[in-house]
Amino acid sequence: MTSHPDHHDARRQDALRDLKRLEHEGGLISGWLRPIAGAPDEDSGDPVVFWGRLIGRGLAVIAFAGLCVYLVLTHFR
């Protein structure tokens, strides 16, 4: 079975276009440190806002990891 380069190229272009759209809309996980569309500007220079967001995001990651460990220990033992 041979593949058609034009078909793969078109799919690749569609995927790249979708990734750019998601990045612009703030839907990519890799962009979690950037502000979500409509959120206040992070470059305001206020250190309280910066540290508050950083601590909040760090606590969210820790809470998520803790929840994952809890679910694994209680449901897959």
Image (tube, helix red, strand yellow):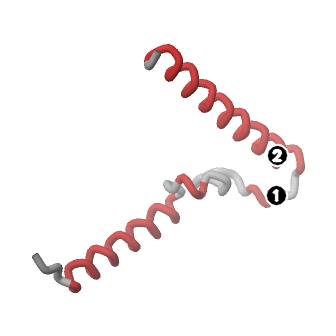
Q: Which is more toward the observer, 38 or 4?
A: 4
Give residue 77's position: percent from left, percent from top.
Answer: 46, 15
> Residue at position x 17%, y 82% from top?
4
Residue matched to label 1: 44
Placement of 62 over or under 48, stated as above or below: above
Sequence-earlier tag: 2 or 1: 1
* Quadrant position of the N terminus in the picture: bottom left
- Determine which residue is flagged by label 2: 49
The image quarter in which residue 35 lies = bottom right
Q: Residue at x 35, y 69 (%)?
A: 15
Q: Quadrant of residue 62?
A: top right
Residue 74: image x %, image y %? 50, 14
Q: Look at the picture and state if 12 lies above or below 65.
A: below
User: Alpha-carbon neighbours of circle 2 within 10 Å: few (<14), some, or many (≥20)?
Assistant: few
Q: Amino acid at mark 1?
A: Ser
Along the line of sight, which residue is nearer the eye, 77 or 68?
77
Circle 2 — which element? helix
Answer with the quarter of the image where residue 8 lies: bottom left
Residue for point 38% across, 67% down: 18
